[in-house]
Image: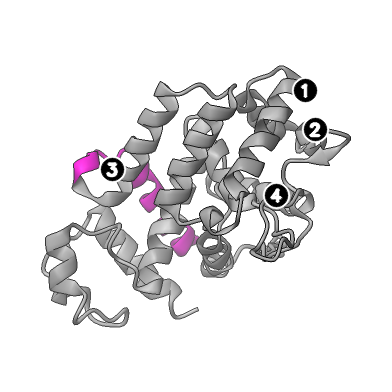
Amino acid sequence: MNKENIKHIKTILQKIKYNNLQPEDNAYYMDKQCILDVFNSTIGTTFKGIKTRLTLIDSFYSTQMTKRYYGLDDLANAMFQLYSKKQQPLSELFKKFLETKDITLFNYDDNKNLFSSNYGIDKNGKEKGVAISLISKYAYFDTNLNFPIYDTIVCEMYPKIWKYCDFDNPMPKLSISKGRVLGDKTIVSFVKAIDELISKFGNDVSYDELDQLLWHTGKVCRGNLSLILSKVQYLTTINNYNINQSLNNLKFLKKDTLLYYYFELAQQLNKI
């Protein structure tokens, strides 16, 4: 166990908790606020409301559902059928799942499951795959940012954070969703893994705070900086940024700020 690195992660998580950045500071916060505004102005118990929400999330987060023929319609219909069967808002089902890890909460229509069903078809009429990432993002906003987002960046950064902290016990197994997978088992194991990581840092850490840590450092590691930098910062950085360069060369980075912590941590994780 690397107590110094664990303490460093906890410091960043505390910075995130009390972060006072406004939506206009960067695209990440603006996008989140736009989606929250739409959730607050639409009804999540109608097909129209659900599809409107899914369409916006898919657009902002590039989950590629619009590239599947009828994908958004299929998913919105499945979520509406789930609500109709359970007669409970989906937000309540998502919250209950976090407590129980009972995937059958999402069974609908002759025991189809929201997380393991396939949505959309290709141009030849062949079924496409599951939609774990998009559903988890919907759940994240539907529970007011209180559901872990499943995506490739989080799955990439999770083992790096685990190794960086050098926890005593073995890392929980994560699987990255690709095409036809057992989406129900994948989301259960994913939430359990996120819960275990949170417990390592203290149970006062929220899903949203951990997601911000993993997502931002993952974006820096990948060199995808447009959503975390202002336009001016991006234009002065994109042509000469290298993950291994001195942070002092990035004049807009100021020590003891969240952005500095993200870049600094990304450099350290990039060596793992």
Q: Nearer the viewer, mark 3 or mark 1?
A: 1
User: What's under tag 1, amino acid-wise?
Assistant: Lys
Label of residue 30 in the image:
3
Label of residue 228 in the image:
none
Span colored in magenta = 3-24
Magenta stretch, main secondary structure, is: helix
Tell whether label 4 touches label 1 (CB within 8 Å): no
The one of 189 and 246 positioned closer to us in this rendering: 189
Tell whether label 4 touches label 2 (CB within 8 Å): no
Mark 2 or 1 closer to N-term?
1
Mark 2 or 4 closer to N-term?
2
C-alpha distance separating marks 1 and 4:
21 Å
Mark 1 or 4 closer to N-term?
1
C-alpha distance separating marks 3 and 1:
35 Å
Tell whether label 4 touches label 3 (CB within 8 Å): no
Label 2 CA crowd tier, 10 Å (few <14, some 14–19, many 20+): some
User: What's under tag 4, amino acid-wise?
Assistant: Ile
Name the residue beneath numbered marker 4. 187
Label of residue 85 in the image:
1
Q: Residue at x 80, y 33 (%)?
A: 108
C-alpha distance separating marks 2 and 1:
7 Å
C-alpha distance separating marks 2 and 4:
17 Å
User: What's under tag 3, amino acid-wise?
Assistant: Met
Name the residue beneath numbered marker 2. 108
Tell whether label 2 touches label 3 (CB within 8 Å): no
Q: Residue at x 33, y 36 (%)?
A: 33
Q: Nearer the viewer, mark 1 or mark 4?
A: 1
Label 4: which secondary element: helix
